[in-house]
Amino acid sequence: MTFRRKNKLATKLGLLFLISILFLEGILFVVLYFGFLNERTKAETDALLARGNSHRDVLEKHFDSDTREHVALMESEAETEVVITDQENNILVHSNELTSAVQQTIKSSNTIPFEGAIIEGNWMREPIVATGSPIMKNNQVIGYVYMILNTQGIRDVRDHLTSQFLIVSGLALFLTVITIIYLSRFITEPLIHMKEATQKMSLGEHDVFLKEDRNDELGELARAIQSLSDDLLRLKNERSDFLASIAHELRTPLTYLSGYADITKRENLSPKERNTYLSIIKEESENLTALVKDLFDIAKMDQKGFVIEREKIDLCTLIRQVREKVTPAFENKGIYLLISCQKDIHITLDPGRISQVLLNLLDNALHYTKEGNTVLIDTSVNNSTVEVSVIDEGEGIPEKDLPYIFDRLYRVDKSRSRKYGGSGLGLAIAREIIENHGGSISALSHEGKGTTIKIVLPGDD
Ligand SMILES: Nc1ncnc2c1ncn2[C@@H]1O[C@H](COP(=O)(O)OP(=O)(O)O)[C@@H](O)[C@H]1O
Ligand SMILES: [Mg+2]
């Protein structure tokens, strides 16, 4: 039952195989049986009749006992048999032993035309086939020549053919069973495993392991399902890691807030001290607001419906607008901000989003660069791309951290980043936006020397 239920496909294919083999074999059998065997017997009986007629011709000339004996002697050496009778069907001579079948056949024969006739042609049921030819003299029948052929030989051939047919049928049946086993092992079973794997996946289990060592379509399917499962597992892990990190990120400022709020409540504080604590509270809550806003941005970008509203703009104008926004902060810290921008770089992008990216990068450059140094925004146009780089002479990023800085919540020095209100989401958001524009973003950095963040955007053709 389970075999049948589980191996529907294999059974169907196997039965199809069996039916086609039996069908072909059946056609072959019918052709051989009715075509070949019938032809063969017809030829034999025709030959028998012709032979009987030729004996008859001899006997019409000399119907004496010597001639009759001579004919009988000739036939006794052949496969065929002859019986010669008088006009009353009384046997005069016969070449071989007279069996009851032969006697019976001769007795029951009716009038035979001059050209002779087949008096027994049913080779399938009767032990003999027989022909008869009348011997005439002066328009009077003076006797008969009967020719007899044993049908055992033909029936042997038929029996042989039938048993051959049965053997082939048995073989086909056996092959079918083998085929079904083979198909179920190599086709149905992998399919069932894959089905079970996808069912497991939809239930949220991801410890799926499929054999993928085949190099056919089923192997490809298994590999696709395996990588889907691996991806899902990775995404699931990433999501829970991310949630844990977010919880952690939120807890720290909230602890500060409640701590400082407690201190501020003390009665013996001077107004100056109270002011200091209140501004810390304000700063922390602003940081928290910024973090929540960044998280919200990230969440929006994760949704499929995240749209980029592109319009054709002049890149330098956009960069100058961004610079205006950050100039006070840079001047405050005593860092020079330079722009190198070719004229007329017209490009289609989402100006709001790209400004956000540049603000994030400049924010980092500002915070990780010491007073008196320079930050440069450089642009260049290549064949089909536009590059924007933010280059600083700051502290740089250690080589071991460099591959991860675009990951969500990744920060080289958590406490330092926190101090300025960083969330570790700035570069992740930047990368998301740039990739949504069909571009790429990368970092180059030497510790102690500075960092270059390079954006490559596809240009307008
Ligand atoms: N220009 C830079 N110079 C040095 N380190 C940088 C620079 N830009 C980014 N980083 C490092 O990469 C980390 C991730 O940056 P980002 O995603 O913007 O987070 P954060 O909120 O900490 O700024 C930062 O914490 C910092 O350690
Ligand atoms: Mg940042």
Image: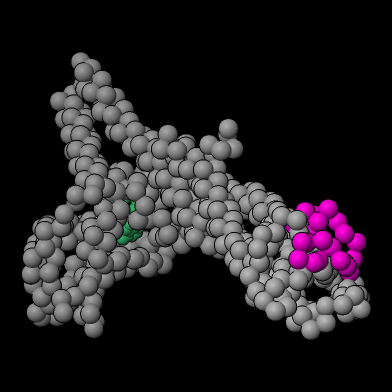
Q: Which quadrant is the N terminus positioned in?
A: top right
Q: Position of residue 314 (x, y in %)?
A: 8, 72
Q: Residue at x 27, y 61 (%)?
A: 435
Q: Position of residue 83 (x, y in %)?
A: 82, 67
Which scheme is used to colour this image of the protein?
one colour
Is residue 144 at all visible to an observer of this figure?
yes
Q: Residue at x 19, y 49 (%)?
A: 305
Using residue 140 as the reference point, say whether residue 183 is left or right of it: left
Q: Position of residue 289 (x, y in %)?
A: 19, 38
Q: Residue at x 81, y 56 (%)?
A: 103
Q: Quadrant of residue 379?
A: bottom left
**Which is more toward the observer, 424 or 159?**
159
How many numbered marks have been drawn onto this rendered protein structure? Answer: 0
Q: Quadrant of residue 329?
A: bottom left
Using residue 389 as the reference point, say whether residue 172 is left or right of it: right
Q: Which quadrant is the C terminus positioned in?
A: bottom left
Q: Position of residue 255 (x, y in %)?
A: 31, 27
Is residue 151 at all visible to an observer of this figure?
no
Residue 88 colored in magenta in the image: yes
The span picked out in magenta is: 85-105
**Which is more toward the observer, 387 or 181?**
181
**Which is more toward the observer, 61 or 306?**
61
Ligand 1 lies in which image quarter? Answer: bottom left
- Position of residue 52 relative to residue 12, above or below, is below
Find the residue positioned furthest to the top: 267
Residue 400 colored in magenta in the image: no
- Position of residue 25 relative to residue 226, above or below, is below
Q: Quadrant of residue 284?
A: top left
